[in-house]
Image: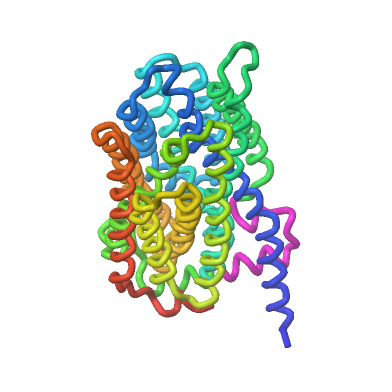
């Protein structure tokens, strides 16, 4: 039989999840649609502007260079100042840059737009992760992050369908690929304004929570923080030298080498493998996204239920590597798409991975390390996206790129399987 305190705790967690998670999911959906819209625009953009695979790959990758500039300080700002205000600022500025991208004419303007977009969006992701640690205890964190992170595969579904429609329009004599950027840039500006009024930085600031539920969430989070502090409080400098942080950075770097290359190149891969028109390509690209949503939600839920993290991170990566090693040997497009759809499960790795640092880090040290790990990973995103463009152009085919992606995911998966990172037992209590 539940005690009154347990009942209040359960009601508080449920109410917080219902109020916050759909909204942060929507914000990240908008974010990732904006990030991936380039891959669909490129189905027409490169032809109109005369961009080679090498130029497109470099431009797509330059996003990550701009992203690096403010990643760590931005995450710390969220912890020490205000998550909702900083996230709102990010959304408004990246929306404006996205709109401007719809007016580029030259490779130089393309490069500049990508650098500015990366700088504008920088620290959005670690900022949301920090925000979630202000609301959800360790035992619920992988599920919360999985719900939020499911926006990534959902964005490939929504974004592909929206882009497939916009590519076919020619409003006001303006090409459809330009309308992708203009339309999809207006949305984050609007939601940036809404964010200021909708989110609350901490439970104590949430007027939509009854007082007893606000107090319960704050007390539970404070107890977890006390447990971590009893094991020793890390400064930001100490956290940067922490062995477990460094060990997590390497597989994340390799994962984003492969995964971000897929984000920016998958419509091009599908078009070249199938020879289908652009409008049909968008529908096929949605399939791996649907698989990714299912895999991410199940993997996050099962990881929290069992308390196991290592293999829940490793298995999706190893499965993804098998997919990209297999595709070059398939001879029928239907088989290729079935295999590629299975590859959508690789994103199930991400929420489990991001629940790991929060088990042994807290407050500013955790925020800074989210930024550090994500910064290192985004460098991988730059190299992976750029190298795929080089491999496509130098080999005249896709096989080298597919093997490169598979190799990155394989090594990342093996590292997670081999790494035995021990977290404080008290932090694993559910």
Residue 387: x and y in percent read 28, 39
Residue that sits furthest to the bottom in the current view:
1
- Comparing 364 with 421, the one in front is 421
Seen at 50% across and 54% down, the residue is: 338
Which residue is painted at 27% across and 38% down in the image? 391
Q: In the drawing, does residue 413 fall left or right of residue 209?
A: left
Q: Residue furthest front?
A: 331
Q: Quadrant of residue 230?
A: bottom left
The quarter of the image holding the N terminus is bottom right
Instruction: Tell me residue 252's x, y (percent).
Output: 34, 55
**Magenta-colored stretch includes residue 210:** yes
Is residue 142 placed above or below 118 in the rendered structure?
below
**Quarter of the figure that contains the C terminus:** bottom right
Residue 59 locus on image (x, y percent): 36, 29
Nearest to the observer: residue 412 or residue 113:
412
**Can I make out residue 424 in this image?**
yes
Q: Does 321 sit left or right of 351 as displayed?
A: left
Q: What is the image's colouring? A: rainbow
Q: Is residue 65 above or below residue 229?
A: above
Asked if residue 80 shows in the view, the reply is no
User: Which range of residues does the magenta coloring cover?
Assistant: 201-221
User: x, y (%) of residue 249?
Assistant: 31, 56
What main secondary structure does the magenta stretch of the protein show?
Answer: helix
């Amino acid at each position: 039989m539940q005690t009154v305190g347990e009942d209040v705790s359960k009601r508080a967690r449920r109410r917080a999840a219902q109020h916050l998670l759909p909204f942060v999911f929507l914000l990240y959906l908008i974010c990732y649609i904006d990030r991936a819209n380039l891959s669909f625009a490129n189905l027409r953009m490169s032809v109109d502007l005369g961009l080679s695979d090498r130029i497109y790959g470099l431009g797509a990758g330059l996003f990550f260079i701009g992203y690096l500039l403010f990643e760590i300080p931005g995450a710390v700002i969220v912890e020490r100042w205000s998550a909702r205000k900083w996230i709102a600022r990010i959304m408004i500025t990246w929306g404006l840059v996205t709109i401007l991208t719809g007016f580029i004419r030259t490779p130089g303007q393309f490069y500049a737009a990508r650098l500015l977009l990366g700088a504008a969006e920088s620290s959005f992701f670690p900022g949301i992760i920090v925000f979630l640690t202000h609301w959800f205890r360790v035992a619920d964190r992988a599920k919360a992050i999985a719900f939020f992170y499911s926006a990534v595969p959902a964005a490939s579904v929504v974004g592909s369908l929206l882009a497939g429609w916009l590519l076919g329009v020619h409003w006001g004599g303006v090409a459809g690929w330009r309308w992708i950027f203009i339309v999809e840039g207006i949305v984050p500006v609007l939601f940036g304004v809404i964010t200021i009024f909708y989110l609350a930085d901490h439970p104590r600031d949430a007027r939509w929570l009854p007082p007893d539920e606000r107090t319960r969430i704050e007390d539970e989070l404070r107890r977890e923080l006390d447990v971590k502090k009893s094991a020793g409080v890390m400064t930001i400098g100490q956290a940067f030298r922490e062995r477990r942080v460094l060990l997590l950075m390497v597989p994340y770097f390799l994962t984003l080498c492969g995964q971000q290359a897929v984000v920016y190149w998958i419509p091009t891969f599908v078009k070249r493998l199938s020879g289908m028109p652009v409008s049909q390509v968008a529908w096929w690209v949605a399939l791996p996204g649907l698989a990714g949503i299912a895999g991410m939600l199940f993997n996050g839920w099962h990881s929290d239920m069992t308390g196991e993290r290592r293999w829940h991170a490793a298995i999706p990566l190893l499965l993804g590597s098998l997919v990209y090693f297999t595709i070059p040997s398939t001879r029928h497009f239907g088989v290729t798409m079935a295999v590629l759809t299975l590859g959508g499960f690789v994103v199930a790795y991400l929420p489990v991975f991001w629940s790991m640092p929060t088990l042994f880090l807290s407050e500013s040290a955790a925020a800074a390390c989210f930024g550090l790990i994500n910064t290192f990973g985004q460098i991988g995103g730059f190299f992976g996206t750029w190298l795929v463009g080089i491999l496509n152009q130098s080999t005249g085919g896709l096989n080298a790129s597919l093997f490169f992606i598979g190799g990155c995911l394989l090594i990342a998966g093996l590292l997670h399987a081999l790494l035995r990172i021990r977290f404080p037992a008290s932090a694993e209590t559910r």
